[in-house]
Amino acid sequence: MNLPTPDTTPAAVDVAPAAAPAAASADTAAASASADTADTAGALQLRTARSLRRHLLAVRVVLNALLVLALLYTVTLTRVMLIPLVLAAFLGLALNPLVAAGARHGLPRWLVASVLMISLMAGIGAGVGLLAQPAIGWFHGAPAAIRSFVPKLRSVTQPLEAANRATQTLVGGTARAPAAHPATMAISAWDVVSTAPKVLAAVLTVVLLVFFFLIYGDSLLRRLVEISPGFAYKRHAVEIVRSIQIEVSRYLLTAFLINATLGALTSLMLWAYHMPDPLLWGAVAMTANFIPYVGAITTTIVLALVGLIHAQQLGPALLPALTFAGMTAVEGNLITPMIQGHRMRLSPIAILIWLLVWGWLWGIPGALLAVPMLTSVKLITERVRGWGWFAVMVER
């Protein structure tokens, strides 16, 4: 008797649908776990990349600071060589338009440069010879002038001295008069002899550098442009060099003419007020005005002291200083901005910081060359990619 065989197919069919959701859920869980792992790994890589960028930025800041300090040390260490070089470069830029104009009319560059240098040296020599004697006279007569100047301030200092004596009496019991130390100021012949070679060497270095800059400056610039890679770079370099050369030359010549006019007007004003040595103080005003703000303040103080030494009453003594202060106020706020234009106007904060830095590094020559250097750097950074922020920061 044959029994019917049980059919297991439906059971198998029933089990398969039940196992499918479990497998799908396992795959989903595995995919979710792998996605979480990938997200975690990506976040970790992102944090690592950000931390690496911060570390690289910190290292870059430290390296830039070390580079700036190294440059400042190098500039200070080599100032004996750099000061004549920078001064000659600016003089060459200022005189180059005259040499170029002569070359356009068919004159040799060496001939025009020679005539300019001879005229410049003759003018400076005549000025030094004219002003040397009154300057030495004021220098040697400074102690006597100070002794004659002090009694004029007695009415101002007498109450302060009385208060000082009263304080010393209350504290120490007896007021003691301060010991008088006579001021001595003299220049020996050995000082002149030992200093003359250094001065002559510096002057000769500047003269030769200016002369050769005027003759070979354009050929040197052409060679610098020729070594630039690619035609686009060459054209860009030519545009930058030519624009900087023209604008710096225009700025230097304009500044010299403005300061020379101010010095001439100062001399005429002092002559009208019957002040001693008006040409000397006019030359001082012209030279000091190359240092913005500080030069005008210093010249005003000097003229006030000279007026107090020369005049007997306070009003006539301070009148030349007040007149010069009014002249410099008009020149600095009206004439110079109108002539130089907006592009050449610099921020007073930037000027004072730049003067402080270069005066600290190079002394008085650094203070005189600071503003031309700042103007040149501003013109360069306006045209160099990535440095436009500096031109924006120093502009008024």
Image: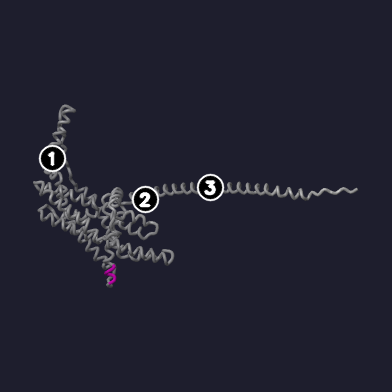
Per the image, label 2 sits on a secondary structure element best described as helix
Residue located beneath label 3 in the image:
43
Which residue is identified by label 2? Answer: 71
Q: Disc 3 residue type?
A: Ala
The alpha-carbon separation of the residues under discs 1 and 2 comes to 49 Å
**Location of residue 334 with respect to 54 vertically, above or below:** below
Per the image, label 1 sits on a secondary structure element best described as helix
| Residue that appears at 58% across and 47% down | 36
> Which residue position is annotated with label 1?
156
Residue reaching furthest right?
1
Q: Looking at the picture, which amino acid does disc 1 mark?
A: Val
Vertical arrangement, residue 338 with respect to residue 170, above or below: below
Q: Along the polypeptide, which appears first: circle 1 or circle 3?
A: 3
Q: Vertically, is 223 above or below 85?
A: below
Q: Residues within 10 Å of mark 2 (few under 14, many from 20)?
A: few
Q: Closer to the observer: label 3 or label 2?
A: 3
Q: Earlier in the sequence, mark 1 or mark 2?
A: 2
Which of 83/247 is in front?
247
What range is drawn magenta here? 100-104
Q: Mark 3: which secondary structure?
A: helix
What residue is shown at x 53% (from left), y 47% (from top)? 43
Q: Residue furthest left?
A: 312
The quadrant in which the C terminus is found is bottom left
Q: On the picture, is 238 further left or further right than 336?
A: right
* N-term-proximal mark, 3 vs 2: 3
Query: Is 362 left or right of 133, judged from the image as shown?
Result: right
